[in-house]
Amino acid sequence: MISFLAKRIMQAVAVVLATASMVFFAVFIIGDPAQLLYSQNASAAEVEAARRYLGLDLPLYQQYFNFMGGLLHGDLGRSFVYGKPALGVILQRLPATLELAFASVVLAVVVGLPLGLYCGLNPRTIRSRLIMAVSALGVSLPTFWIGIIIMLAFAVNLRLLPTGGRGNTLTVLGVPWSFLTIDGLRHLLLPAASLALWQASLILRLTRAGTEEVLRQDYVRFARAKGIAPGRILWVHVLKNVLAPVVTMVGLSLGGTIAFSIVTESIFSWPGAGKLLIDSIYAFDRPIVVAYLMLAVTIFVLINTFVDLIYAAIDPRVTLGAADSGS
Amino acid sequence: MIEQTDTAALTLPPNPARRPVYEDLLDFLRDPVAAVAAFVFLVIIMLAIAAPWIAPQNPYDLASLNILNSGLPPGSSSLTGGVYLLGTDSQGRDLLSAMLYGLGISLAVPFASVLIALVVGVTVGLVAAYSGGRLDTLLMRLVDFQLGFPPVLLALVILAVSGPGLGKTTLALATAYWAVFARLVRGAAQSERQKEYVVAARCLAIPAHRIMFRHILPNVISPLIVVGALEWGACVSLEATLSFLGLGSPITRPSLGMLIANGLSYIMAGRYWVSIYPGILLMSVVLCINILGDRLRECLNPRFKA
């Protein structure tokens, strides 16, 4: 266990450092941000001063070492637009994104798991076919289109819910949260639902397929023959074996959710890190883009490691050594 | 799957590998949903190809646009005569024409990127599986590493750095998807590698690249076709997302995603059509491709046939 963890942490650090190098060379070589940031009217001397101020006049290897050195100290440069440390600007916005992502994952599990079980247990009914058809839509439609449709239906036409923003927030531990107030929840519902649809559809399909497969297994037949109550068979014998791939799916989709929240946040004006990323791309605010990327890589690596650990915990057949070498 | 057209196949007992093509096609269309999807998709493809001849207006010809025509509802007549069947967008473009032209971009850019991703992925996967050892480990680590990232984020970052453009979008999408093919081919090819025909080919001292591309590749082609089709659907969706964010297709040549984005600010004002019609078209494209891809999987995968 400990050697597995140590190995994974080493790998994670290597991945983050490798990504940092790639990001550095990709982002910093392609263009000179000083020319993009300053107006056409700026004199050559002004642009030169700006480049010196941003450290862009240094030779490339020195810029690289400065960048990597800063990274180790958690310093990812200053935002060109906000004039504050880039990491700080993002971290300030991150709770809103995480709130949205978690809300959508919870919504997806709460909707997807029971519906998947239902479809797996009653595959032939009209209701489960209808559910499967909707989930086919949910898997294939682009998230932004789902978001627009949901917004058009519930916010513009029916006027039931607000179209954007976070609404009233309650500050706990120095961070404002929307899910603690009624108004905040109303603002959270639509973006979370539009993010949740594809995950719910995936979870549903995975649960259904798993349930159908497990029901055919000998041990379920044996449990039935032994006279174990159907409820116990479902909740203990079936669910336990269905759950392992679903947990992986949920864990991995958390990463996808954070990525897709970039789109959803832009549609619903949710002031999270994703919207910040898009705004920063438009504003050529590279330190923010780089910092967002580094943070995203770190989060994804953490999630992947965590998923492996949970997977090993719920499925006794998986040993951690094997999970590590599989590719 | 290799199709053979010799007439002897017709008289032989049914053998799925040697049946004539039209029988496979009939089998494919037996599913009514797939048949409808195939028909709709055919119409969509023809519309996209015929766009320059059937579109009422050339949306790229700025001289023919008039800002006074912007935001007209469906069915209104233009200043120069003629009717805007689906209304106009914020630039005064005939929405139907813009959609027909955008459809082509929305289909072709993802198609090209899937082709590039396929070629790169297949090559990397075959090389990894065939060579084994340290190169295999290295290549597959790279693939694992990349698959840990959502394709949206990767393509988004590439375009954020490079700026919008059709060629850049194609490459960004290809970069986001090649790893899927590499892993698929590597897995399939690795099990093929153990088989007698590969061992025999090696004994005959046939060069490695010939074994990889001529012997192993044809045997792993059917999962590739299925995944390629489904990835095309995903790619159409992703291209639309990127263009929606203003990072994909350039403003002068909008794809469906950008047309939807252009209409977003109008939705609140009740001018729903600028977003809804391109959206419905996009939805139909993605759904058709996915349904056809799923049906392809059912037909090509013998496990589903039983």
Image (cartoon, grey):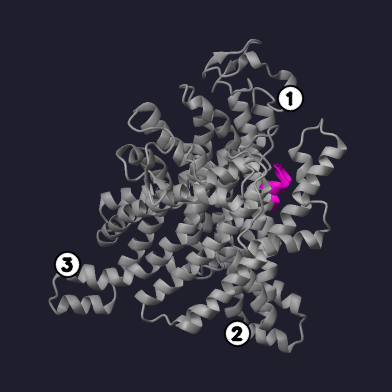
The quadrant holding residue A199 is: bottom left
**Residue depicted at x 82% and y 30%:** A41
Q: Quadrant of the N terminus of chain A?
A: bottom left
Against B69, residue B43 (above or below) is below
In the image shown, does A21 or B162 lie closer to the viewer? A21
**Residue depicted at x 75% and y 49%:** A54
- Reading the chain from its start, which is encountered first: label 1 or label 2? 1
Dominant secondary-structure state across the stretch colored magenta:
helix
Q: What range is drawn magenta here?
A: B160-171
Residue under pointer 2: B194
- Secondary structure under badge 1? loop
Label 1 packing within 10 angstroms: few (<14), some (14-19), many (20+) = few
Residue under pointer 1: B61
Chain under disc 2:
B
Label 2 packing within 10 angstroms: few (<14), some (14-19), many (20+) = few
Chain under disc 3:
A
Of tags 1 and 2, the one toward the viewer is: 1
Query: Of the residues shown, which amino acid type is indicated by label 2?
Result: Gln
What mark, if any, has residue A231 been given in the picture? 3
Can residue B185 be seen by looking at this rendering?
A: no
Against B228, residue B82 (above or below) is above
| C-alpha span from label 1 to label 3 | 67 Å
Label 3 packing within 10 angstroms: few (<14), some (14-19), many (20+) = few
| Residue A14 rendering spot, x and y as whole percentages | 63, 72
**Residue depicted at x 53% and y 70%:** B12
| Residue A168 rendering spot, x and y as whole percentages | 37, 37
Chain under disc 1:
B
- Secondary structure under badge 3? helix
